[in-house]
Image: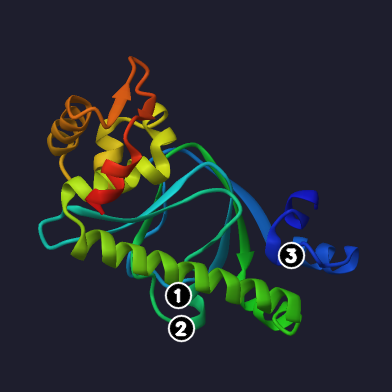
Amino acid sequence: MERIKNIACFSKLNDEQLEKLKKISVVKKYNAKEILFYEGDTPIYLYVLLQGTLKVYKTNHKGQQIFLHQFYPGGLVAELAHFENIPYPATAEFTSNSEVLRIDYAALEKDFFKNPEISMEIIKSLIAKHRILIDIIQKEVVLTADAKIAKFILENGELFATLKNTQIASILNITPETLSRTLSRFKVSGWIEMNDKHDIHILDKMALEEML
């Protein structure tokens, strides 16, 4: 009950409403590399990531993964597919052991969508997804590989200590070789330094920002 109340969409519900929501929900555990849903699947449940990490990607005609976004605990996952009544437009795969709150969407829509506070939180979530889409377009259409890496260092530099280079390269839709070469060039240029644990320290923020 307390975990549900900590989710922004449901934080204002009273105990009776929370109990009702609990009856149409279940917490499921997943291992890294398990699939939550595939591109083209029909959406049945609304998912909230409670613990772990989840990546969303599309697959091109060559079978290559095109990374779109990484979800972290607390957010709704792919709710737009429900609202538009369309199949999932991408595949969601767990990148670490995770827990998900799975909610019967039809029951949620029937019993809870008249609640203005829930509706407002869902609107906020959709606006956030719109920002994600804009970021994807900018990253894939506008930015060079160097600029992608500079942007990632500026915004998510701490992830270099927890993710492998192959994972970061996948997120940026570049090859691991390109990532390694660019990081080496940034280090030689005196823009960043990186220790044995892959912790990154920015030495010249202005130079990285100019890449964008």
Please indicate whether residue 79 sits to the left or right of residue 152 in the image.
right
Q: Residues within 10 Å of mark 3 (few under 14, many from 20)?
A: some
Secondary structure, mark 2, is helix
Pointer 3 or 2: first along the chain: 3
Residue under numbered circle 1: 81
Return the residue at label 2. Answer: 84
Residue located 17% across and 35% down the image:
182
> What separation in Å lies between label 1 and label 3 (alpha carbons)?
20 Å
* Cα distance between the residues tagged 1 and 2: 5 Å
Left or right: residue 157 compared with residue 140: right
Identified by mark 3, the residue type is Phe
Label 1: how many Cα within 10 Å (few below 14, some 14–19, many 20+):
some
Amino acid type, mark 2: Glu
Cβ atoms under marks 1 and 2 closer than 8 Å: yes
**Amino acid type at image mark 1:** Ala
Residue found 26% across the figure and 42% down from its top:
207
> For mark 2, does the 10 Å Cα neighbourhood hold few (<14), some (14 to 19), or many (20 or more) residues?
few
Taking the image as shown, residue 196 lies to the left or right of residue 116, namely left
The residue tagged 3 is 10
Furthest-left residue in view?
A: 62
